[in-house]
């Protein structure tokens, strides 16, 4: 889509870095990388976007013992990505207080706020595919199971959280802020359980095609996020969870 519509790939690269990516200072350069576990489709997209931006960039790969794949490359201190967002560091370091961290240059989505809906929609889809998803609860009614779902975006950074909420609203998606005492900021992310919002997200394209739910999910590990999204919107009732899993397929 990016190549076909001749879109600038940099906003999409920045979005991936501001979700599951990093940009670290390494002596006289920056190391820029993206990490994903079990979702190789997202790693592939990251590589394609970087190559579309600059085909001369050399991308390396590192695989952790956990199976997480990190694709990374290096850029000089003065580069286009740092001009897009002042920082890509999304949380304090281990030996840094939240107050100290918040006094340093902060990541920002202002670049996306200024762009048109084509960019915003695709970046939203990327963000929800990276650091978000669909959570499902089951309700029993007359010995039948009904699925109840909500969309969420994990984002503990207060500024990014607020900016994502505004950008989502720009395209017609109304999300609520989710708070948590267990995060460094007191903010967990964004969510919506309204069916109209979830349905509209699907109409906008849904998750990036092929992206799957993490394997540690009890019932839905390895299932494509878009498959689960579709079934939740069908408002179907099931006899048991085995029937649900059968509907989702392999």
Image: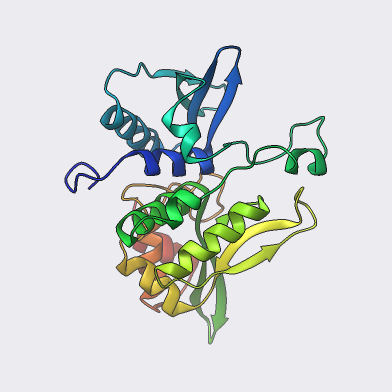
Identify which residue is drawn at 39% across, 68% down: 171
Tell me which corner region of the image, top left, top right, bottom left or bottom right, holds residue 205: bottom left
Please state the horizontal and vertical placement of residue 71, each as a whole percent of the image.
44, 25
| Placement of 250 over or under 101, stated as above or below | below
The residue closer to the viewer here, 140 or 178, is 178
Name the residue at 29% across, 42% down.
Answer: 8
Residue extending furthest left?
4
Residue found farthest to the top: 27
Could you say which quadrant of the image residue 178 lies in? bottom right
What is the x, y in percent for residue 199? Answer: 38, 74
What residue is shown at x 56% (from left), y 53% (from top)?
218
Q: Position of residue 126 (x, y in %)?
A: 41, 49
Query: Who is closer to the viewer here, 209 or 165?
Result: 165
Please state the total of marks drawn on the protein image. Answer: 0
| Residue at (73% x, 37% y) in the render | 92
Asked if residue 238 can be seen in this view, the reply is: no
Q: Nearer the viewer, residue 73 or 224?
A: 73
Residue 187: x percent and y percent?
A: 71, 57
Query: Would residue 43 be seen by someone viewing this image from the given angle?
Result: yes
Direction from residue 230 to residue 85 in the image, left or right: right
Q: Going by the image, does 232 lie left or right of 106? A: left
Q: For residue 163, what is the image quadrant? A: bottom right
Q: Is residue 49 above or below residue 167?
A: above
How is colour applied across the structure in the image? rainbow
């Amino acid at each position: 889509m990016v190549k076909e519509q001749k879109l600038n790939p940099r906003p999409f690269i920045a979005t991936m870095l501001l979700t599951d990516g990093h940009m670290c200072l390494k002596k006289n350069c920056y190391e820029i990388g993206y990490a994903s576990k079990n979702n190789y489709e997202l790693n592939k997209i990251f590589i394609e976007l970087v190559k579309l931006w600059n085909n001369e960039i050399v991308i390396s790969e590192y695989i952790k013992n956990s199976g997480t794949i990190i694709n990374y490359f290096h850029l000089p201190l003065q580069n286009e990505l740092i001009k897009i967002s002042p920082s890509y560091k999304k949380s304090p370091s281990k030996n840094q207080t939240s107050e100290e961290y918040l006094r340093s240059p902060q990541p920002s989505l202002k670049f996306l706020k200024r762009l048109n809906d084509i960019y915003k929609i695709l970046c939203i889809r990327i963000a929800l595919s990276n650091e978000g998803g669909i959570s499902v609860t089951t309700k029993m009614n007359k010995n039948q199971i009904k699925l109840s779902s909500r969309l969420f975006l994990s984002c503990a950074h207060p500024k990014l959280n607020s900016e994502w909420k505004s950008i989502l609203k720009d395209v017609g998606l109304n999300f609520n802020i989710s708070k948590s005492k267990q995060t460094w900021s007191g903010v967990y992310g964004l969510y919506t359980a309204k069916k109209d919002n979830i349905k509209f997200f699907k109409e906008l394209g849904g998750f990036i095609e092929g992206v799957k739910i993490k394997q540690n999910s009890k019932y839905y590990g390895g299932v494509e996020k878009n498959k689960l999204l579709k079934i939740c919107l069908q408002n179907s009732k099931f006899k048991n969870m085995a029937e649900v899993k059968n509907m989702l397929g392999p």
